[in-house]
């Protein structure tokens, strides 16, 4: 019997072929580590429409290390991760996709880093041109991470994904945060602790198709931006201020011209249009200000702790 338990969380949506293959592969990888660690494999069936849950149940019958959770419908990858993190009992928890895009063998490296004193071991895919990672996905991913890093309060690794190892301390912190629409790639950096990155070459998805449709990617990106950035609200205020200022100056100029050069220069209509634009600018400022107050409510509702204590002494 080993002392350290390591949990592996695998969110699965329509992965009837991959889920049992993943179980086999994980068993192989973990066999080499069996002299030091015990393992548990937590498969989360995110409302699959195929036989994924049946396959997971079969694995669980054959192998007591396998634990299964099945959602009543599809709640999305991030929520499946949350369920897995909550169920995991290990001293370290590794999350990995079911489709083999991320090499299970890398788990050994993640554990080594963890033993080296890191609490968070993130992974980053290195781009491999031979692999036809669809051009569309690469471009959207690149655009998203550039935008995210430009506007958000916490850094988010480019080419990052949800293949990572978390120490028990980090898992416990993450599971106390009750905000909805979590964006783990941001939260994991937000909580701090000592972290590092391991690079890997992504492989091709083995069976099935990607479940991250454009709509799901947009919703993930939106969750990331709204939970880690206040730039959109400040942007509205700035835009409103710029519009109101420009239109106001233009009005003054038009008034001056008409006053000194005669009434044939700018029509009443022109005055009306520019006044409306100026008013719109003022409305936008007001909306932005309201948004800043809503932000305060938003933060209260997110309920993130104001700080996270990692250690204390003589307390
Ligand atoms: N997944 C999930 N729920 C979803 C979509 C995906 O649990 O609604 C799982 C999926 O089974 C896989 C992982 O999340 O294990 C990553 O999804 P996918 O491979 O489809 O995304 P991609 O790698 O193409 O971004
Ligand atoms: Mg994938």
Image: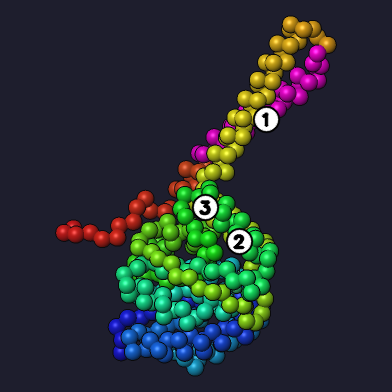
Q: CA distance from mark 2 to mark 3?
A: 12 Å
Q: Which residue is the site of mark 1?
A: 280
Extreme front residue here? 130
Q: Which residue is the site of mark 2?
A: 141
Nearest-to-viewer mark from 1 and 3: 3
Nearest-to-viewer mark from 1 and 2: 2
Quick check: is 174 in the magenta stretch? no
**How many neighbours does mark 2 have within 10 angstroms: few (below 14), some (14-19), or many (20 or more)?**
some
Q: CA distance from mark 1 to mark 2?
A: 34 Å
Whether tag 1 and tag 3 are in contact, CB under 8 A, the answer is no
**Secondary structure that dominates the magenta span:** helix
Considering the image in quadrants, where does the C terminus appear?
bottom left
Residue at left 46%, top 59%? Answer: 187
Residue at left 67%, top 30%? Answer: 280
64 left or right, relative to 139:
left
Q: Which residues are magenta?
A: 265-293
Q: Give the image location of residue 74, x and y in percent.
A: 61, 70
Residue at left 49%, top 60%? Answer: 157
């Amino acid at each position: 019997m080993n002392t350290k338990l390591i949990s592996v969380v695998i969110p699965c949506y329509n992965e009837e072929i991959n889920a049992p293959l993943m179980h086999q592969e994980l068993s192989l990888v973990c066999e080499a580590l069996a002299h030091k660690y015990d393992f548990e494999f937590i498969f989360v069936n995110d409302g699959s429409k195929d036989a994924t849950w049946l396959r997971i149940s079969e694995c669980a019958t054959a192998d007591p290390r396998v634990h299964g959770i099945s959602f009543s419908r599809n709640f999305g990858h991030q929520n499946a991760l949350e369920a897995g993190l909550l169920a995991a009992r290990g001293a370290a928890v590794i999350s990995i996709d079911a489709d083999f895009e991320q090499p299970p063998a890398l788990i050994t490296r993640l554990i080594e880093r963890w033993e080296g004193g890191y609490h968070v071991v993130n992974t980053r895919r290195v781009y491999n041109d031979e692999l036809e990672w669809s051009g569309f996905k690469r471009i959207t991913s690149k655009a998203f991470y550039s935008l995210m890093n430009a506007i958000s309060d916490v850094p988010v690794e480019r080419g990052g994904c949800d293949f990572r190892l978390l120490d028990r301390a980090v898992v416990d912190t993450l599971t106390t945060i009750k905000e909805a629409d979590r964006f783990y790639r941001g939260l994991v950096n937000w909580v701090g602790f000592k972290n590092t990155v391991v690079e890997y070459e992504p492989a091709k998805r083995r069976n099935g198709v990607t479940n991250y449709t454009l709509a799901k990617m947009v919703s993930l990106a939106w969750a990331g931006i709204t939970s880690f950035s206040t730039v959109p609200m400040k942007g509205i205020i700035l835009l409103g201020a710029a519009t109101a200022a420009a239109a106001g100056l233009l009005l003054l100029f038009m008034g001056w011209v008409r006053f000194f050069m005669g009434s044939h220069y700018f029509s009443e209509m022109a005055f009306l249009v520019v006044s409306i634009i100026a008013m719109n600018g003022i409305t936008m400022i007001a909306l932005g200000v309201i948004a800043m107050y809503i932000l305060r409510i938003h933060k209260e509702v997110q309920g993130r702790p104001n700080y996270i204590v990692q250690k204390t002494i003589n307390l």
